[in-house]
Amino acid sequence: MKDAAPQPVFLSDYTPFGYLVEDVHLTFRLDPQATRVISRIRFRPNPDTTDRGFFLHGEQLRLVTARIDGATITPRITERGLTCDVPDAPFTFQAEVEIAPAANTALEGLYLSNGMYCTQCEAEGFRKITFYPDRPDVMSVFTVRIEGSEPVKLSNGNPTAQGDGWAEWHDPWPKPAYLFALVAGDLVAHADRFTTASGRDVALNIWVRPDDQGKCAFGMEALKRAMLWDEKAYGREYDLDIFNIVAVDDFNMGAMENKGLNIFNSSCVLASPDTSTDANYERIEAIIAHEYFHNWTGNRITCRDWFQLCLKEGLTVFRDAQFTSDIRSAPVKRISDVIALRARQFREDNGPLAHPVRPSSFVEINNFYTATVYEKGAELVGMLKTLVGDDAYAAALDTYFDRHDGQAVTIEDWLKVFEDVTGRDLSQFKRWYTDAGTPRLRVSDAWQDGTYTLTFRQMTPPTPGQPDKAPRVIPIAVGLLNPNGDEVLPTTLLEMTEAEQSFAFPGLATKPVPSILRGFSAPVILERATDNSERAFLLAHDTDPFNKWEAGRALGRDMLMRMALTGGDADAAYLDALRAVLRDDSLDPAFRALALRPPAQDDIAQALHDAGHTPDPQAIYQAADRLGQQMAGHMADLLQGLYQAMAVPGPYSPDAEAAGKRDLQGLVLSLLTRRDGGQTARAQFAAADNMTQQLTALSCLMARQLGQQESQAFHDQWRHDRLVMDKWFALTVAHARPEDAAAGAAELAAHPDFNIRNPNRFRAVFGALAGHAAGFHHASGQGYATLADWLIRLDPINPQTTARMCAAFETWRRYDSARQAHARAALQRILATDTLSRDTTEMVSRILD
Ligand code: 0A1
Ligand code: ZN
């Protein structure tokens, strides 16, 4: 039977814990079936509150003994934790509990991955390790002793002592329990050192299984780059003698910033030219930086409660984006981020799962590690920086670090820092944190007597629980161009604060062409009645790289919408414009690749829905295919030449320039493959000495249903490498014909190397099905039914990953009634499953609501 409906937690109910934790001593006696965790925790009454209720979280723990000040007690224990009577004075709580890491398939708390012990405690996993006030505002100093036969035993902080079968660690920095980590196993280190600006010598290690030792060098270089960057850009130094990273194969997310002991999904740290693509390299570099940057934005200053998650995540995503922009191409990074923001966050913000960047209630916090909290959260930091300026931003961050180091704080504290430093009132800006939904920004213009006027109207549609929205402050970066292409107004910031507002630009000789929302200065949907000739003009002339790209994207989107609705062909003018971009050698190849890649099919579905149509995924799929065919035809004479010109000589290097060329070469190859029967792609596949080119060639062939032999060869070549096999599983589903995608995914789930317990493998197959727009939303309903079957199977094993993947269904109401009926049936079937996890129950209920 299902439990009673899980109860939400509310931000407004926050109260501090009645006790402070002076320090914590933990001893782990490791055993796969019966690990003993022995804790000694010193509490004292919290002078900031009179509430003296004593409750320690604890789930799935077998209590062996508990003591207060040495005397055995018999606490009251529920499914959620423990209560007992305690003195109204400082006291020591001790407990011994037993847990079973080998039985932990949820990958939360202490678990085993390929025989290696590891932990994941964010958000609320520590309560599966021992009884503790498992909330981020309870910070303490941890000392940890690990006993076991594993050769390597790691925890947070610095190592203090070790002997035969044991090791001890001490972390001097007070931290919440979610940053606790322990790792033990047969691991080897790729070691290096870093000297901080003030001269601290830090030992750096990336710990991996012995076979993976050759895949650590890039990650290590990325770590050192990130450490140096944080010193230079933010004045932040590392604060321990050792920094450890560990790669694990079974992990629900990308990586985790545990103090001094970052734990990574192996796919986000291991890299080698043979096995990793350029995109993998860039992602690894960004995630290593992200976790490292958390040491200050997250660890030294943490969140008061989980409603404040964006405080650490939005800021840290913003910082890692700055890092990538600085060491790679800033425009390419910005464009890529906006593509991802629109694909994931706009989609979320415009559907049943919409929630504020800082939510005010949740049932299961694991369901709020979302694109809204992370990516929109980062956009808010970027807007703040735009509004106050670079110098004030730097001063505010210095104040933030000075004022709040060692504390667990809120969005109010964060905004107060900016208010104090700048004297601005940010109460209107705060709506960005509290109100869900993507604002629509409608623009109109007027031209009279040498004055050009832009008028903006903002409107945010209702979202669950928030019917009405007040206007927000919106930073709108604008430039103006002459009809001959010269810039007459360089980028200027307009600050919109009203529902409707006009801005005048006097003294112009001719009516200008506006370039609005340069650099995507705010996460809004810009609506402007414009024509394709203006877009083509901006694509050719805009000096702002983002808006140059945006003009091409808008052209492509509108054309694909029309092609999907009417079954028609691509515009010659559009194809001409793309052709001009393709052959413009003054443009960065990576930029050209972005400009030539048409919007995703899911974006077209959303755009059709927004324009009042019911999208037909099959028609969109066919339109995208026709467009590819017509692009290939229109540019046929350029393809071979460009293919050769983009070849990168010499040994493989993942740097941005080489990667950009390979990206454009790959795009050209996809067009060429439509014309040469796969000859060039086959040759590239056979000759490739790196995974980027091997996989690109395979993908081009499979997209045309030409790659059966190569697919088999790839499978046989890489069968021993789990991360490469994930790529093979994903590609096989991604390139199935729409009518075959669901059955293909189910068939792959019967492959001997499919493993439902490994989140990477599960996501490779079923994430690819969810991402196959025409396959997942196939009229037969098979996409929905198959995903539901497998989510029902996964839920008892791994609720967190199941719940996250339910988001595949979030767009179901966009489609026709027959598809909606199939989707509803699939969702209801999930919801009706006995003992469905609270994670999945919450997600499916919200999606169906
Ligand atoms: N804080 C990590 C992400 C993370 C969140 C939850 C996890 O388990 C539920 C694991 C990792 C980050 O932002 O990188
Ligand atoms: Zn993070």
Image: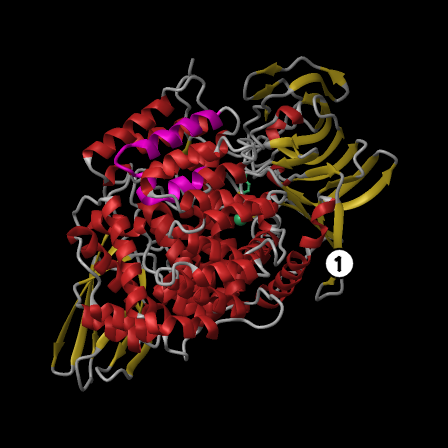
Residue occupied by mark 1: 192
Identify the residue shown where x is 27% and y is 72%.
577
Identify the residue shown where x is 32% and y is 57%.
599
**On screen, residue 592 above or below 713:** below
Identify the residue shown where x is 52% and y is 29%.
798
Q: Residue 97 at x, y = what percent?
A: 69, 21
From the viewer's side, name the closer residue of 385 and 33. Answer: 33
Assign a secondary structure to mark 1. strand
**On screen, residue 501 above or below 347:** below
Quadrant where the N terminus is found in the figure? top left
From the viewer's side, name the closer residue of 770 and 572. Answer: 572
Residue 496 seen in the current view? no
From the viewer's side, name the closer residue of 831 and 423. Answer: 831
Question: For the view shown, which residue lies furthest in the right direction?
Answer: 164
Residue 138 seen in the current view? yes
- Is residue 404 covered in magenta? no
Q: Does 817 sit left or right of 773 as displayed?
A: left
Main secondary-structure element of the magenta-colored stretch: helix
- Is residue 789 covered in magenta? yes
- Give the residues in magenta: 766-795
Quadrant of residue 720 within the rendered picture: top right
